[in-house]
């Protein structure tokens, strides 16, 4: 659904005479696959200029240097007739810390300006942002600057878990059915992203006693850990 929505926005940016700039914010739990979705939309776009703005690129930089580097990415995009920029993990880009809270206001103001800055005539830009902190984005005024937003659904039912386990070929059909039954009987209240679940599956794969019971043990530990995180 989100990939299809992204495709429609790509077409809109490319073809509409009224919206040469469109921005989409994708939010969801850590490990929900937000970056992968944004990257898929970007790669499927076929745009000649695609750039990723990621916190890892700016480790050790001062606030001013970081702002300069982000601004240059946008300036490079404006030179291309059709561009797409992914701003990944916005809260980490802002050095956001919930205690306080603390964040880089200089980087925040730079992003707020660039997200809304119209490219020159005959230039078109699609901006995709990702965040695990939707509430924080609202508080900082970031979400409001995006034209649209989409939430990546989390895994919250035994059937969701069984579907992922089946997809990555951890168990055969009968064992998957048994796993779903065990999860239903356990009556765990959980909300998980895809990444933590894949990590559990790979841990189970390394266990000599690879079974639905082993999976349930690791899964239960992960759910408890998340509840106290």
Image (cartoon, rainbow, N blue to C red):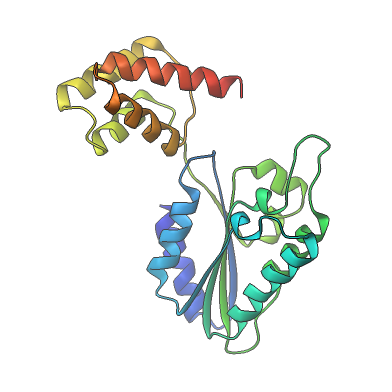
Residue 158 appears in which quarter of the rendering?
A: top left
Side of 200 relative to 181 (left or right): right
Give me the residue at 23% from left, 17% from top: 178
Side of 201 relative to 228 (left or right): left
Give me the residue at 44% from left, 76% from top: 47
Residue sitting at the far front: 60
Q: How many marks?
A: 0
Residue sitting at the far bottom: 122
Dividing the image into 4 quarters, which one contains the C terminus? top right
Residue 119 appears in which quarter of the rendering?
A: bottom right
Is 172 drawn above or below residue 51 in the view shown? above
Front one among 123 and 1: 123
Q: Does residue 93 appear anywhere in the picture?
A: yes
Q: Position of residue 16 (x, y in %)?
A: 52, 80
Q: Position of residue 31 (x, y in %)?
A: 49, 40
Residue sitting at the far top: 185
Give me the residue at 44% from left, 28% from top: 156
Is 168 drawn above or below residue 161 in the view shown? below
Give me the residue at 35% from left, 27% from top: 203
Q: Position of residue 130 (x, y in %)?
A: 57, 53
Q: Position of residue 79 (x, y in %)?
A: 59, 86
Q: Does residue 19 appear anywhere in the picture?
A: no
Front one among 47 and 184: 47
């Amino acid at each position: 659904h989100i990939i299809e929505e992204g495709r429609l926005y790509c077409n809109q940016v490319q073809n509409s005479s009224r919206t040469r700039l469109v921005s989409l914010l994708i939010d969801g739990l850590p490990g929900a696959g937000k970056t992968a979705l944004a990257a898929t939309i970007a790669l499927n776009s076929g745009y000649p200029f695609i750039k990723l703005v990621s916190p890892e690129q700016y480790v050790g930089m001062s606030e001013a240097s970081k702002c300069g580097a982000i601004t240059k990415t946008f300036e490079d995009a404006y030179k291309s007739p059709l561009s797409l920029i992914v701003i990944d993990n916005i809260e980490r880009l802002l050095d956001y810390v919930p205690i306080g809270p603390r964040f880089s206001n200089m980087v925040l103001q730079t992003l707020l300006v660039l997200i809304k800055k119209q490219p020159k005539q005959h230039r078109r830009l699609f901006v995709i942002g990702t965040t695990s902190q939707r509430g924080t984005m609202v508080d900082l005024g970031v979400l409001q600057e995006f034209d649209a937003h989409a939430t990546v659904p989390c895994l919250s039912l035994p059937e969701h878990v069984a579907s992922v386990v089946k997809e990555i070929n951890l168990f055969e059909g009968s064992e998957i059915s048994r796993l779903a039954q065990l999860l239903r009987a356990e009556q765990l209240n959980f909300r998980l992203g895809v990444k933590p679940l894949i990590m559990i599956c790979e841990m189970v794969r390394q266990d000599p006693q690879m079974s639905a019971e082993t999976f349930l043990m690791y899964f239960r530990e992960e759910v408890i850990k998340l509840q106290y995180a």
